[in-house]
Image (spheres, coloured by chain):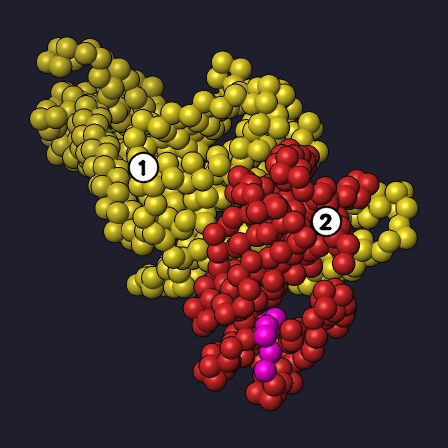
Chain colours: A yellow, B red
Amino acid sequence: MKLISKTILYYLLISLPLVMLAGFFSYNIIRYELREGTDESLIREMEQAERLIKTFKVPHNIMLSTDSLSDIAVINNYHADKFFFTETRMFDKAEEEYVTYRVLKCYTNINNTTYLITILKTTLEEDELLEGLFSGLGLMIGFLVFAFFIVNWLLAKLLWKPFYVTLDHLNTYEIAHHKPHAFSAAKTKEFDQLNKSLNKMTQKAFNDFKQQKEFTENASHEMQTPLAIVQANLELLMQSSHLKEEEMNQLQAIENTIKKLGSLNKALLLLSKIDNNQFKESEKINLVDVINKALNNYQDLIQAKNITLDVYFNNDLFLVVNPALAYILITNLLQNAIRHNHEGGKISINLMIDTLTISNSGEALTINENDLFVRFKKNDSSKESLGLGLSIVKSITALYNFKIEYKYIHHLHTFIVKF
Amino acid sequence: MKILLIEDEPELRKSIKQYLYQEGYLVESAEDFVKASDKCADYEYDCILVDITLPKGNGLDIVKKLKQNQSKAGIIIISAKNSSDDKIAGLDLGADDYLAKPFNLAELNSRIKALLRRRNFDGNKSIIINEITIIPEERSVTVNQEPVNLTAKEYDLLLFFVSNKNRVVSKNSIAEHLWGDDSDQMDNHDFIYVHLRNLRKKLMDKGCTDYVKTIYGIGYNFKVNP
């Protein structure tokens, strides 16, 4: 739910009972005041009737006023002086409906005669007034609510504008493309504070991110020299003429491990360099040349596994990229297609307009295909794999905004790169 | 042949020195920028191996100074930073080659030999091992004066063996020499055997002795009796 809808809903929820309560009270107050008025005029008419009786001593009907019905009667029984109000309903011919009347009954003793004065006054006016008052009030409330919506909407547009700008900014924020003070100053104090805090926070996150990246790079660099020392000593040891076969095999195992460690280190370093955007120099290259070079260098591997290679270039594809990265992108995909292939399998490479498709036969995936590009996630069957090849592919495609996706089509693992 | 090794890591310095000494080079070493600069100024070397990250300075500055002084020494940069920027900077300054750590000593050795061969224009242009003659400039090989038709990989393999003759070279170092960084991606190096078998066959067809000895699982030794 949007902030504005929510605000209005809450306002409505709070104002509805308030309006009802206010309506209830004002109805009663107004009704009370109107009744008071009616009663006062009834009393006035009663006093006038008494005066008339005293003056004329005639106990007959007297028209007291135009809007009331009255009756003066002589009572045989004695009643002390008193008056009281009641209400009665009668059919009004003019209005064609039952109408409530306010009735004043008064016993009064004048010259030893007891009179009963009855005065009726219609409350029609009172009711109509109340009705009118309430429809007026209702209209006003309706208008106020409408005005409230409009004002709120305008305010939201106006007041909350910097907030929505900040929100948009935050939605598209990427730590890798961090710029300091990306959240600009706002005129509203709270939003200004928000933006300042966001600037501070993203800056801190970026610094941590940078440190983290530098750490990977530095750690990899620091490992190169010790690896070089082990490698060098191992090679010297290999030259010894006194080694037995068993010891040679052990040396071989050590060398393979160092080699793997070195490759892992290089791959990590490469990844952090891509992510740190350290491959700045670009040039125009033809992807077809890159693929041919890679195929040339990997033909031994392809032949060793008796893999049938099917290559089709529909067209040349020129890209302005770092040539080393372009080569790494292709060789990683190619290596992946060779490694996860079976003996006598097939690889097909297809370049069509701006889309490169590399597909290979091989065992079905044992990992979720969404994890394919995640670092160190690898299929069970590939113990030799470092688990970084496809992460590197992903990083390179991300760097140049190429699209890569994996599909399993006709029992072939297929990687599709859209340049 | 005199080589100056500029490397701050004592263990690595020792190993490289020992390996190159066995190759018959005269190896001197320097462990920091100042000592290296002094030695470069005072003596002539045929080849200088220089690490980029050094105590008290940058190895690239040594390369710069050597070039300013029109030194005739061949320069190979050995660096832990396998960054193309450093590589380009080093080669732009006039270094002859660049080797990233960790490297194989056999690879370093073959790079030094190749460099010295290229530098030594007036000298012998061919490498002669008994009946085998290699002319690196033409990438051609003859056995008993008969040309042998080798593929690029077979030729590189032979040259690598010859550069490291009478030494055990591992399959890993061969793979790295022949396939460069791509060898990182290769799961096993069994296919080296295919190239080796072809090379052996082509040489022996011309009546060449089989110099390549298999050393158990680890690699090969191109054994030439001195």
Measuring 28% from the left and 44% from the top, which residue is drawn there?
A152
Q: Kindly identify which residue carries mark 2.
A: B222
**Seen in the image, is A158 located left or right of residue A57?**
right
Measuring 19% from the left and 11% from the top, which residue is drawn there?
A97
Magenta segment boundaries in residue numbering = B44-53
| Image quarter in which the N terminus of chain A is found | top left
**In the drawing, what numbered circle is on residue B150?**
none
Along the line of sight, which residue is nearer the eye, B205 or A117? B205
Q: Secondary structure at mark 2?
A: strand
Residue lying furthest front: B145
Q: Of the residues shown, which amino acid type is indicated by label 2? A: Phe
* Residue A55, horizontal then vertical, whole percent: 12, 34
Q: Secondary structure at mark 1?
A: loop
Q: What chain does mark 2 sit on?
A: B
Along the line of sight, which residue is nearer the eye, B206 or A285? B206
Along the line of sight, which residue is nearer the eye, A232 or B209? B209
| Image quarter in which the C terminus of chain A is found | top left
Measuring 54% from the left and 43% from the top, which residue is drawn there?
B147
* Residue B38, horizontal then vertical, whole percent: 61, 88
Residue A353 figure quarter: top left
| Mark 1 → mark 2, Cα distance in angstroms | 45 Å
**Seen in the image, is A187 located left or right of residue A129?**
right
Q: Of the residues shown, which amino acid type is indicated by label 1? A: Leu
Q: Kindly identify which residue carries mark 1.
A: A317
